[in-house]
Amino acid sequence: MEKFIDWGKEYLLSHGYTLKNNLPENVKNTPWSCVIRYTTSDGNIYLKHTPNLLALEASIIQILHEQFHAFVPEVIAHNAELHCFLMKNAGRPLREVLKQQFDAALLCKGINQFTSMQLAVADHLNAFLEIGVPDWRLDKLPDLYMQLLSQKEILIADGLSEKEISELEKLLPKVSDLCRKLSSYSIKQSIVQPDFHDNNMLIDDISQNITHIDLGEIVISHPFFSLITCLKQAKRHHALTDEDDAYLQLTDACLINYMAFDSKDNIVEAFKIASVLIFIYGALSDYRLLKACDKARFTESFQRHGRPGVSLKEFMKACIQDKLSDKFV
């Protein structure tokens, strides 16, 4: 840790910043990322460090900023060798504001920005694939699913039985059919952020500008996976239900930009299918995290992260529900 903290300090001092505190503040320290805050003469500057296999964030942010003028952090320096980068302060987490007084319009604004960004980059995916962003498009999802199921030792250690793994293997035709059905709608695949929610949106208290952060685990897949996650998190953290007007506003915000490409009925139907396939996407994301991080650091406090078996069990559960098992295939 000292190496990248010292690099950040030296960079700032050599580029005209004055550090107001000798010791930077540790904001976040997990197996998958470490965030340090420097208090400087030009406001707070943040350093983020990730494991090597997740060290794409600075490059992703720079592409989004330079080519698409997206609402993302301003990266001021990047050290590829140390897997870290420096970025300017962009405000406080939107969730802090919404916890004080929930404002659906603010969250809708953030969702609209994100879906607009997804649509903007959908025809330029090579820019991301060329830097190593994983390709999990729907035509590749069935093979990725079977590759994951072949990791039996890891899955059994994560709580799956051999019988459950066998049952999951039998669900391959369903996975393929769901992917084929979802692909039939006029929704272009794009960037997907696994943790798209209000705690990964920063809001500036003065300008009210919203900035999207935590973009290092982005993959190329179906855009609705991010939006489903956002809605689930809104329910969890803001006590919303399906019937609440605020939740309906958020749902509309997720879908409105996509309704320019297909009918409302088709967009809603696609969203329902994606709500089943998201468990496959989630399992792949968990496995990616597990491979990238130091296993010894996965303690009880991080027991939900890096656990593909949890999402795979949820997928099986979804498939045995009548309303999901036969409706879409």
Image (cartoon, helix red, strand yellow):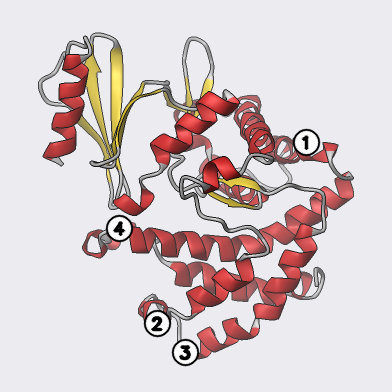
Q: Earlier in the sequence, mark 2 or mark 1?
A: 2
| Farthest residue, direction bottom | 163
**Which residue is pictured at 52% across the width and 67% down the height?**
311
Q: Earlier in the sequence, mark 2 or mark 3?
A: 2
Q: Earlier in the sequence, mark 2 or mark 4?
A: 2
Are circles 2 and 3 on residues that touch, CB within 8 Å? yes
Looking at the rendered image, the disc whose residue lies closer to the viewer, 1 or 4, is: 4
Question: Horizontal and vertical percent for residue 68?
Answer: 59, 27
Task: Identify residue for label 3.
Answer: 162
Q: How packed is label 4: few (under 14 Cα within 10 Å), some, or many (20 or more)?
A: many
Task: Identify residue for label 4.
Answer: 293
Q: CA distance from mark 3 to mark 1?
A: 43 Å
Can residue 172 be seen at all in this image of the molecule?
yes
Task: Identify residue for label 1.
Answer: 256
Question: Horizontal and vertical percent for residue 203?
Answer: 49, 22
Q: CA distance from mark 4 to mark 3?
A: 25 Å
SS class, disc 2: helix
Q: Which amino acid type corresponds to the residue marked 1 in the rendered image?
A: Ile
Q: Which amino acid type corresponds to the residue marked 3 in the rendered image?
A: Glu
Q: Earlier in the sequence, mark 1 or mark 4?
A: 1
Task: Identify residue for label 2.
Answer: 156
Q: Does 164 appear above or below 209?
A: below
SS class, disc 4: loop
SS class, disc 1: helix
Are circles 3 and 1 on residues that touch, CB within 8 Å? no
Q: How packed is label 1: few (under 14 Cα within 10 Å), some, or many (20 or more)?
A: some
Asked where in the image residue 172 lies, by quadrant, the reply is bottom right
Looking at the rendered image, the disc whose residue lies closer to the viewer, 2 or 4, is: 4
User: Is the C terminus in the top left, top right, bottom left or bottom right quadrant?
Assistant: bottom right
Looking at the rendered image, the disc whose residue lies closer to the viewer, 4 or 3, is: 4
User: Is the N terminus in the top left, top right, bottom left or bottom right quadrant?
Assistant: top left
